[in-house]
């Protein structure tokens, strides 16, 4: 039996907090153990430091950020910018999934601005069924999972797919009660707050956190709440059909 565990699998060390940090906090409050896994080491997260320097900084930041939302942090050590959609990486994810045996998996969508994100989403979908096949080899003694987890894809980076339109989601979680803690956890990735975008702060909030707040406002507006996080549930063949978030986070989950 899968236990009350959530496994959030993302490309980079700061993605878990940015894309699902509110919902993960609400699931923690619902009694679930939370693990945030990043596939990459974050080596590309600096324009000035060496790969080794920024990897060490980001590991420390990621552990602190995860701790703020009561999560464990795991890093799979793949080089940043280099996630390939291949068998080797699938085996790494099968190992992770078998060892944690989560009831719920959260990951990126399979279409995203960052290839590290979209490949992660695709690798997770490759790994989940194979995690249940005991003859699929992975470097672990953990048993094959007995049922597929409830699986959700977060919003893409910037909420937009390649056509520039706001992505469609089937589930919006009301994170209004935990938005400040989400942004605090995300901003704990201090090295990343000014990397890709303007680095100024407004009212003490760095630009990357402001952007993340805007995404939450956009999703919130869709269902007339203050702040939301959007998801699409994976509903291929053998995946469980029930939207379990509705039961676990009562009164805070909107379906569209
Ligand atoms: Zn990322």
Image (tube, rainbow, N blue to C red):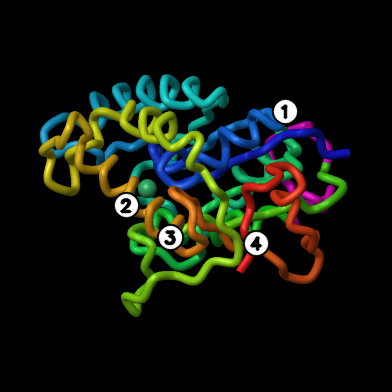
The residue at which mark 1 appears reads as 31
Q: Nearer the viewer, residue 30 or 187?
A: 30
| CA distance separating discs 1 and 3 | 28 Å
Q: Which residues are magenta?
A: 129-143
Q: Residue at x 78, y 71 (%)?
A: 237
| CA distance separating discs 1 and 4 | 21 Å
Q: Residue furthest bottom?
A: 163
The majority secondary structure of the magenta stretch comes to loop
| CA distance separating discs 4 and 2 | 23 Å
The residue at which mark 4 appears reads as 233
Q: Residue at x 40, y 29 (%)?
A: 185
Whether the residues at callouts 4 and 3 have beta carbons within 8 Å, the answer is no
Say if disc 4 is inside 8 Å of ligand 1.
Answer: no
Decide which of tag 1 and tag 2 comes sooner along the chain: 1
Say if disc 3 is inside 8 Å of ligand 1.
Answer: no
Decide which of tag 1 and tag 3 comes sooner along the chain: 1
The residue at which mark 2 appears reads as 214
Q: Nearer the viewer, residue 59 or 149?
A: 149
């Amino acid at each position: 039996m899968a236990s009350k565990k959530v496994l959030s699998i993302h490309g980079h060390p700061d993605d878990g907090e940015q894309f699902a940090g509110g919902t993960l906090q609400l699931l923690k409050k619902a009694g679930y153990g939370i693990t945030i896994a990043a596939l990459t080491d974050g080596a590309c997260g600096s324009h000035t430091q060496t790969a080794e320097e920024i990897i060490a900084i980001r590991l420390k930041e990621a552990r602190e950020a995860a701790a703020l939302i009561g999560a464990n942090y795991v890093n799979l050590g793949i080089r940043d910018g280099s996630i390939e959609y291949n068998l080797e990486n699938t085996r790494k994810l099968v190992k992770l999934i078998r060892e944690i045996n989560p009831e719920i998996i959260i990951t990126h969508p399979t279409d995203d601005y960052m290839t590290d994100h979209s490949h992660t989403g695709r690798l997770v979908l490759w790994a989940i069924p194979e995690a249940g096949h005991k003859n699929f080899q992975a470097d672990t003694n953990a048993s094959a999972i007995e049922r597929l987890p409830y699986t959700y894809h977060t919003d893409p980076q910037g909420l937009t797919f390649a056509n520039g339109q706001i992505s469609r989601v089937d589930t919006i979680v009301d994170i209004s009660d935990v938005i400040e803690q989400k942004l605090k956890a995300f901003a704990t990735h201090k090295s990343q707050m000014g990397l890709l975008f303007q680095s100024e702060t407004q009212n003490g909030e760095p630009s990357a956190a402001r952007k993340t707040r805007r995404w939450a406002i956009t999703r919130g507006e869709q269902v007339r709440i203050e702040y939301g996080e959007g998801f699409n549930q994976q509903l291929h063949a053998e995946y469980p059909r029930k939207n379990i978030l509705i039961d676990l986070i009562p009164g805070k989950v909107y379906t569209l």
